[in-house]
Image: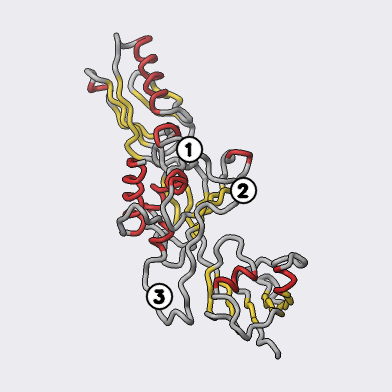
């Protein structure tokens, strides 16, 4: 746990340039000062770490246990040194056919192999016909065959090269960390293969208090073609007879009563006949839903979930 805490501090510093083992990347993204009074733009509540979503982040046992060895592909540049035989040492580019050209061996297929597999293969080929007890060292000089795409509220979105053992935290740091508008949620869409349970999409939220689950999630290895998105915070407006009217960030599965509670609850004059106003993004159609708070509290009526840009109006109670 001490090790995890120390590495978490490094992660936090890299993501948002703010040290402290008790602060996660989400908290760092919220750090810039907010303008306006607290009455008009109250600070959003920090989310609970890892809200219930499907699938949940994998329970990874440790960094060394889940780093898959890199497999080379077209465009990768390899450095191949034959010890004691400098004339055979080469820098070779993996061709679109997945082969490299080497002295004596000509074209050798290496696409889809790991570095250790390539080293064993070349050692065997040289030993079979040309050298006695050859010793080779193979390294990737430039990674050019595998990429992920990062979109959304990061400072440097775009296509990022995957290197050996690239993790989510590596790519987020390379992307400059989150912007102040980031929600703290990260969505990974897998193009090749799937996550545990056959899911193609994984959602995770970095908690305000940096937890072991956050740490393990950031240690997740990425695959070629993964799409990583950092959505912006979405807001709901609560107006009328509540203690703190204003806009509030939607965290998790926020409902009408939850939004009202976030706004401090009803005033002494607040009525129970609440209106939920929503504009459908696709059509622009405005719908107004009446919510009876008394019926919701008694369990007679459902508590509607809020959507981005909803407006909840609490009327003044008539005496």
Kindly check if marks 1 and 2 are in contact, taking CB atoms under 8 A apart as contact: no
Q: Residues within 10 Å of mark 3 (few under 14, many from 20)?
A: few
**Residue placed most toward the observer, 121 or 183:** 183
Which label sits on residue 54?
Answer: 2
Task: Give the colour scheme of this rendering.
Answer: secondary structure
Kindly check if marks 1 and 3 are in contact, taking CB atoms under 8 A apart as contact: no
Q: Which numbered disc, 1 or 2, marks the residue that appears first in the sequence?
A: 2
Examine the rendered structure and indicate whether residue 126 appears above or below residue 36.
Answer: above
Residue at position x 72%, y 78% in the image: 288
Q: Is residue 169 left or right of residue 288?
A: left
**Percent from the top left, x then y, of residue 67?**
43, 35
**Residue placed most toward the observer, 228 or 42:** 42
**Percent from the top left, x then y, of residue 81?**
28, 25
Q: Which numbered disc, 1 or 3, marks the residue that appears first in the sequence?
A: 3
Name, please, the residue furthest toward the bottom. Answer: 319
Q: Residues within 10 Å of mark 1 (few under 14, many from 20)?
A: some
> Disc 1 marks which residue?
60
> Disc 3 marks which residue?
34
- What is the quadrant of residue 15 in the picture? bottom left
**Percent from the top left, x then y, of residue 141?**
32, 37
**Residue placed most toward the observer, 232 or 94:** 232
Q: CA distance from mark 2 to mark 3?
A: 33 Å
Q: Secondary structure at mark 2?
A: loop
Q: CA distance from mark 1 to mark 3?
A: 36 Å
């Amino acid at each position: 746990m001490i090790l995890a805490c120390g590495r978490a501090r490094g992660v936090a510093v890299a993501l948002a340039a703010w040290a402290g083992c008790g602060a996660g990347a989400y908290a760092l993204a919220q750090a810039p000062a907010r303008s306006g009074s607290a009455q008009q733009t109250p600070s959003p509540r920090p989310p609970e770490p890892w809200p219930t979503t499907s699938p949940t982040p994998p329970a990874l046992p440790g960094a060394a246990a889940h780093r898959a060895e890199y497999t080379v592909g077209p465009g990768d540049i390899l450095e191949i040194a034959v010890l004691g035989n400098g004339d055979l040492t080469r820098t070779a580019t993996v061709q679109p056919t997945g082969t490299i050209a080497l002295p004596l061996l000509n074209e050798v297929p290496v696409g889809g192999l790991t570095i250790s597999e390539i080293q064993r293969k070349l050692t065997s080929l040289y030993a079979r016909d040309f050298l006695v007890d050859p010793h080779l060292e193979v390294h990737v000089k430039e990674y050019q065959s595998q990429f992920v795409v990062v979109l959304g509220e990061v400072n440097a979105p775009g296509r990022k090269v995957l290197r050996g053992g690239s993790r989510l935290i590596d790519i987020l740091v390379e992307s400059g960390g989150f912007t102040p508008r980031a929600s703290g949620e990260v969505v990974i869409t897998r193009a090749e293969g799937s996550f545990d349970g056959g899911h193609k999409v994984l959602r995770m939220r970095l908690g305000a208090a940096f937890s072991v689950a956050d740490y393990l999630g950031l240690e997740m290895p990425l695959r070629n073609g993964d799409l990583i998105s950092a959505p912006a915070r979405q807001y709901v407006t609560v107006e009328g007879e509540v203690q703190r009217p204003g806009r509030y960030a939607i965290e998790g599965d926020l409902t009408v009563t939850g939004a009202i509670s976030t706004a401090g609850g009803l005033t002494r004059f607040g009525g129970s006949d609440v209106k939920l106003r929503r504009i459908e993004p696709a059509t622009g159609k405005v719908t107004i839903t009446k919510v009876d708070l008394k019926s919701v509290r008694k369990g007679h009526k459902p508590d509607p979930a809020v959507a981005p840009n909803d407006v909840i109006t609490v009327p003044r109670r008539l005496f």
